[in-house]
Amino acid sequence: MLKPIHYVSCSPALAACQRLMQKFSLWLCEENVHVVDITPDNLKARMPSHIEAEWLWTFLQRIDAGQALLTHANEIASTPVNEKNALRSWILTVSRLADQFQPNPIAWPATKPVVAETAWSAFKPLMMAFYEKGFRSGLPYLFDGTPVAIGGINYANFVQAFREAHRQNPNPNAHEVCVLCGGLLGQTPEVDHWIAKSAFPLLSVCADNLLPICGECNSTANKGEKDVHSAGSFDDWFHPYFRSANGKFHLDYVLPELTVKCTAIETADQPKVDNLSQLLNLADRWTREFKAEYANQQDILRGRERCRVKKAQTRHTLADVQAYVQQWQADLLPSQPHHEVHQVLCSAMLEPARLAAWHSELASVS
């Protein structure tokens, strides 16, 4: 969340799908709904529109792990009433994610609902299939959330819309930046579920929960599927859309160790900053970039010094080294990857002691 994050043009379509998932799953949990009730006609009577009902029925015929998704729906409909009620309560709470970032939120379910493993093993893949199969191939919605039988938005549409909306440089050939770490996004960004879909499959297609990020941020070593709450509390956590970290912290350096640390602008936000840094290993990753660019700039300056020596020109003075760093700092572009880290590095290099050390090092270049 180093960069601003906002909803994109097709977010209403994702929100519409989230409502469909909620309505469908709650209907399956009704006491009087049984296997025989899951029919095209009943879906048309209970879902928001006939288009969505028809898409849903076709969707249920799709095969997942060797069986139709309809089998999962049948298993949920066959669940005992007490377990249906537990699942229903869980669905209602998870559907109100935004409430967690308001004062006095209701308790967030830190674990799966108290239902038999057979029920959860049906509910989880059914909800995740809306992402893995439905979203990938196409949802029954236009960008604005209007139901449509053909030509609805899909995964590729969302990724493209997000990339376009979050470009730091409008030139399509320019580097793209990851909104979380500020590094290079890469050619194939990965759509992250901020709250892991493996634990909260109801949020697998949710405009409040999806954002394309770089592969390093999304790796198991960094964010992966780690929790973004503390035992069900979001108090000490940022959120991409509901509680952005952008502008809430800055980068500092510890020059003797050449390390970067994250410091909250407001003291009350420091636990959130610490959690975000630990979640994504930001301090360590930014420190690596800090050191790598430090070495790169050292090599550039040494190369320039070698050129001067070879041409029998005067060596760099301390003022020359300072001017070089100042020009380097002036040339930094906010649209480039690692801009914030490089700004911190420039500030560190302009400290008198470090400038003197760099100047002294050049004396050994021949």
Image (cartoon, rainbow, N blue to C red):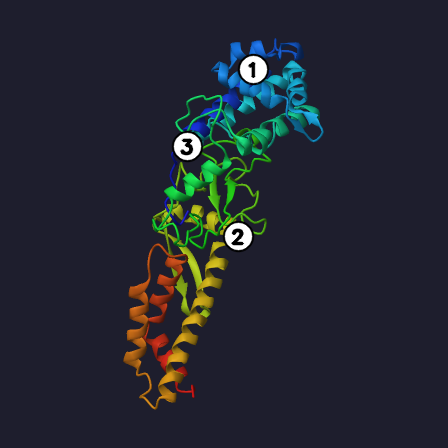
Question: Mark 2 or mark 3: which comes first in sequence?
Answer: 3
Locate residue 251, reporting x and y percent. Answer: 38, 57
Determine which residue is flagged by label 2: 216
Q: Secondary structure at mark 2?
A: loop
Q: Is residue 202 above or below residue 173?
A: above
Question: Visible in this render: residue 50?
Answer: yes
Question: Visible in this render: residue 104?
Answer: no
Q: Mark 2, residues whose alpha carbon is within 10 Å: few (<14), some, or many (≥20)?
A: many
What whole-number distance in Å separates the C-alpha atoms at marks 2 and 3?
A: 25 Å
**Residue occupying the point 53% across, 23% down:** 21
Which is more toward the observer, 147 or 87?
147
Q: How many marks?
A: 3
**Cβ–Cβ under 8 Å for marks 1 and 3:** no
**Residue occupying the point 56% across, 15% down:** 27
Numbered disc in front, either 2 or 3: 3
Which is more toward the observer, 219 or 58?
58
What whole-number distance in Å separates the C-alpha atoms at marks 2 and 1?
A: 39 Å
Numbered disc in front, either 1 or 3: 3
Question: Mark 1 or mark 3: which comes first in sequence?
Answer: 3
Locate residue 316, reporting x and y percent. Answer: 32, 83
What's under tag 2, amino acid-wise?
Glu
What's under tag 1, amino acid-wise?
Trp
Question: Which residue appears farthest toward the front when viewing the image?
Answer: 150
Determine which residue is flagged by label 1: 27
Locate residue 14, reporting x and y percent. Answer: 46, 29
Q: Secondary structure at mark 1?
A: helix
**Residue occupying the point 52% across, 35% down:** 232
The dot on residue 227 is: none
What's under tag 3, amino acid-wise?
Cys
Determine which residue is flagged by label 3: 10
